[in-house]
């Protein structure tokens, strides 16, 4: 039961993270809560950041200063207030502890859909909370980030729709089909996948005192990295006894690709690499070409990462 509960918390943590939900009780999440989250869900052996409130404030002000040097302090403080309002708003809609208790009671009875239907009906309020915070964030974004902001908002909206499809049928099915157990079984592997795909965005040795925030964009390089993450995660989840959790996670990644230009970027990298190796044309036929492209995909992604 303890393992299932931990896996369920991991599942809901991932789902609620997309919603911008705070993990904790009724209060705004603290740095201690964030530390507990990283220690619980990051793979063993991965270095844990030592982040202070002053570090976060410095990073935020530095970010705003790049977009608007004259008003950096005021803008960063506005985002801090907006974040507090966001967490307060969302915590008023959903409490992670209460949700987990309701999930544990409903699962044996097969009533998970009832639990998630209740919370998914609050989605419009959650979406408004996120929109309000995004409005406070916009003045601190660079020009490329602003150009990507609309796309990021669409992706977020689609993920919300995915999570609450038919009033939460997707997440209810995920739990019913042993999705939490599957996640728990491969938690270490998924953490390694995340580290190998996006770990380079973290400061070396997690030295937060010299760190800067990366641009919040989803360009060709990030698309290839996201596909790398997807491929790695699905490779492990497909080893679970039930294939349904892997299928649902794959569908979530497809939602992201559909609302972005990521599929084009991944296809272009694969095609360019295949042409460089002389794998196009009549040699081998279409089926052989497809098999070769699939077998070369890990190498393709690695080459794209190094060249970016």
Image (cartoon, rainbow, N blue to C red):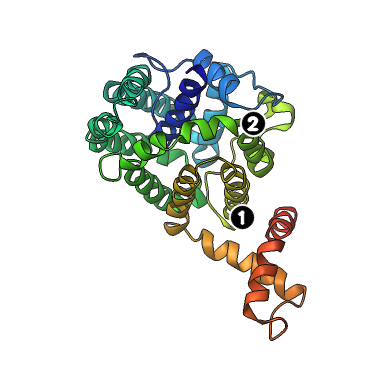
Residue 224, numbered circle: 1
Taking the image as shown, residue 248 lies to the left or right of residue 48, namely left
As drawn, 299 above or below 12: below
Distance Cα–Cα, label 1 vs label 2: 22 Å
As drawn, 306 above or below 37: below
The one nearer the camera, 58 or 213, is: 213
Residue 132 screen position, x and y as percent: 31, 35
As drawn, 225 above or below 273: above
Q: Please give the name of the residue rendered at 66% of the width and 25% of the height, measured from the top-left corner.
A: 208
Image quarter of the C terminus: bottom right
Q: Please give the name of the residue rendered at 55% of the width and 16% of the height, measured from the top-left corner.
A: 36
Taking the image as shown, residue 280 lies to the left or right of residue 140, namely right
Residue 232 screen position, x and y as percent: 63, 46
The one nearer the camera, 290 or 281, is: 290
Q: How busy is the neighbourhood of tag 2: few (under 14 within 10 Å), some, or many (20 plus)?
A: some
| Total count of labels | 2
| Element under disc 1 | helix
The reply to whether dot 1 and dot 2 touch (C-beta < 8 Å) is no
Quarter residue 170 falls in: top left
Q: How busy is the neighbourhood of tag 1: few (under 14 within 10 Å), some, or many (20 plus)?
A: many
Q: Please give the name of the residue rendered at 57% of the width and 54% of the height, measured from the top-left corner.
A: 223
Quarter residue 190 falls in: top right
Of pointers 1 and 2, the one earlier in the residue sequence: 2
Question: Among all residues in the image, which is located at the extreme bottom?
Answer: 282
As drawn, 268 above or below 234: below
Circle 2 is placed at which residue position? 188
The one nearer the camera, 219 or 290, is: 290
Residue 98 screen position, x and y as percent: 32, 17
The one nearer the camera, 129 or 39, is: 39
Q: Please give the name of the residue rendered at 64% of the width and 22% of the height, measured from the top-left corner.
A: 49
Residue 66 screen position, x and y as percent: 55, 39
């Amino acid at each position: 039961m303890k393992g299932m509960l931990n896996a369920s918390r991991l599942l809901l943590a991932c789902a609620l993270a997309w919603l911008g939900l705070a993990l904790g009780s009724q209060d705004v999440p603290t740095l201690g809560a964030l530390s507990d989250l990283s220690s619980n869900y990051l793979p063993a052996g991965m270095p844990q950041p030592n982040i202070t409130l002053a570090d976060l404030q410095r990073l935020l002000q530095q970010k705003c200063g790049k977009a608007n040097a004259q008003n950096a302090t005021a803008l960063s403080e506005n985002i801090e207030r907006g974040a507090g309002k966001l967490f307060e708003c969302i915590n008023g809609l959903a409490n992670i502890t209460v949700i987990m208790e309701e999930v544990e009671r409903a699962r044996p009875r097969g009533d998970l859909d009832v639990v998630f239907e209740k919370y998914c009906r609050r989605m419009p309020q959650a979406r408004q909370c996120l929109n309000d915070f995004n409005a406070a964030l916009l003045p601190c974004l660079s020009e490329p980030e602003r150009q990507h902001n609309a796309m990021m908002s669409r992706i977020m909206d689609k993920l919300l729709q995915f999570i609450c499809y038919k009033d939460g049928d997707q997440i209810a099915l995920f739990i019913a089909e042993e999705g939490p157990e599957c996640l728990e079984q491969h938690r270490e592997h998924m953490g390694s996948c995340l580290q190998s795909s996006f770990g380079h965005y973290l400061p070396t040795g997690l030295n937060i005192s010299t760190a800067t925030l990366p641009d919040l964009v989803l360009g060709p390089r990030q698309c290839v990295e996201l596909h790398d993450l997807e491929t790695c995660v699905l490779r492990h989840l497909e080893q679970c006894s039930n294939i349904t959790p892997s299928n649902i996670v794959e569908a979530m990644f497809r939602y992201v690709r559909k609302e972005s230009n990521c599929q084009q970027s991944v296809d272009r990298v694969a095609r360019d690499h295949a042409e460089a190796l002389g794998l196009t044309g009549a040699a081998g036929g279409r089926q052989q070409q497809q098999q070769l492209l699939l077998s070369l995909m890990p190498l393709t992604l690695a080459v794209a990462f190094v060249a970016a």
